[in-house]
């Protein structure tokens, strides 16, 4: 994989256009344009889309500007990687074959310039999250996806939009975040004990970096309140805020 590798997650591109959404996308595209200038790879660590479900002959039109930007990046020689999150797991050939260089349906293990990286979206990682892990298995099963495909797209997307609007996944209580910090660091420690140098995780919207033993853990921020990205330059992993004036 080409370095530097940029890691971004939880952008949650919305189905519904709004002035706020337009500003968010413009800010994202400024970062992506910067990546085009430096070269390297861009690794989306899940929940790039707030909802994505692809049908054999249909793709969502709400993300047209992103598809365009992705093509521009590829034309400039940027490698595009997408590890799927709990909001955008249901991709098919358009994403896997046309848009991205590589798509990961599960956690990814990378070896770049002699360093070992463990990359996970992070959903279902918490030890007490038993119910979610079962739900995750169901909604990712071939049968569920087959069944959902028979729901008319207009109804499927209306449903998704309603769920997305009611979602409060962007802010978590302080107590929850405290537990997450402890838990994710425990998971990271385990990986570092097994030879990994770095771990990158999304989903929890923290935008924080932790040193655990000899390793480093980045829990990426979301693109609502604390846009941030991590860079692996071939030696070290660092976390950076992006246009973070809110
Ligand atoms: Mn997520």
Image (cartoon, helix red, strand yellow):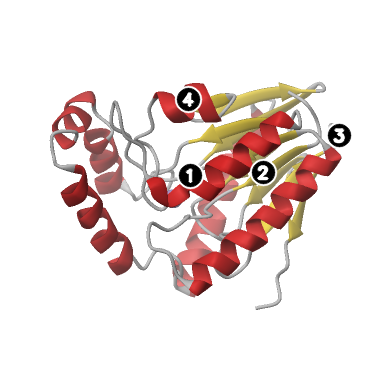
Q: Quadrant of the N terminus?
A: top right
Q: Identify which residue is drawn at 51% across, 51% down.
A: 183
What is the distance, in whole Å, between disc 3 and disc 1 at their CAs? Answer: 24 Å
Determine which quarter of the picture holds residue 39: top right
Q: Are marks 3 and 2 in contact (CB under 8 Å)?
A: no
Give the mark, 2 or 1, whose residue is nearer the N terminus: 2
User: Looking at this view, is 195 or 161 the one in front?
Assistant: 161
Q: CA distance from mark 4 to mark 2?
A: 18 Å
Q: Marks 2 and 1, Cα distance to the nearest angstrom?
A: 14 Å
> Comparing marks 3 and 4, which lies closer to the viewer?
4
Secondary structure, mark 3, is loop
Q: Which secondary structure lies at badge 1?
A: loop
User: Label 4, on which residue?
Assistant: 96
Along the polypeptide, which appears first: circle 4 or circle 2?
Answer: 2
Which residue is labeled 3 in the image?
235
Q: Is mark 3 within 8 Å of ligand 1?
A: no
Secondary structure, mark 2, is strand
Which residue in the structure is indicated by mark 2? Answer: 7
Q: In the displayed structure, does residue 72 sit left or right of residue 235?
A: left
Quadrant of the image containing the C terminus: bottom right
Residue drawn at x 22%, y 31% is: 145
Tell me: is circle 1 under 8 Å from ligand 1.
Answer: yes
Q: Is label 4 or label 1 in front? A: 4
In front: mark 2 or mark 1?
Answer: 2
Residue 159 or 203: which is nearer the viewer?
A: 159
Foreground disc of the pair 3, 2: 2
Decide if residue 211 is in sight here: no
Nearer-N-terminus badge (3/4): 4
| Towards the viewer: 179 or 159 | 159
Q: Position of residue 107 (x, y in %)?
A: 50, 30
């Amino acid at each position: 994989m080409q370095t530097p590798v940029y890691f971004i997650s939880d952008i949650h591109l919305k189905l519904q256009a709004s002035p706020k959404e337009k500003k968010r996308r413009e800010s994202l595209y400024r970062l992506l344009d910067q990546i085009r200038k430096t070269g390297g790879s861009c690794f989306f660590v899940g929940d790039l889309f707030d909802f994505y479900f692809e049908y054999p002959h249909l793709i969502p039109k709400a993300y047209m500007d992103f598809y365009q930007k992705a093509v521009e990046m590829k034309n400039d020689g940027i490698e595009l990687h997408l590890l799927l999150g709990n909001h955008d797991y249901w991709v098919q050939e358009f994403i896997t074959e046309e848009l991205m260089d590589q798509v990961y349906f599960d956690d990814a293990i990378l070896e770049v310039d002699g360093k070992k990286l463990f990359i996970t979206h992070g959903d279902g990682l918490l030890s007490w999250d038993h119910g979610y892990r079962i739900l995750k298995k169901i909604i990712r099963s071939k049968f569920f996806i087959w069944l959902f495909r028979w729901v008319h797209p207009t109804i499927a997307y209306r449903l998704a939009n309603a769920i997305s609007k009611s979602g409060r996944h962007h802010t978590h209580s302080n107590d929850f975040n405290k537990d997450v910090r402890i838990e994710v660091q425990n998971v990271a420690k385990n990986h570092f004990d097994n030879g990994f140098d770095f771990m990158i995780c999304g989903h929890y919207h923290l935008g924080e970096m932790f040193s655990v033993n000899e390793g480093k853990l980045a829990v990426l921020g979301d693109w609502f309140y604390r846009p941030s990205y991590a860079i692996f330059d071939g030696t070290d992993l660092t976390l950076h805020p992006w246009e973070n004036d809110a």
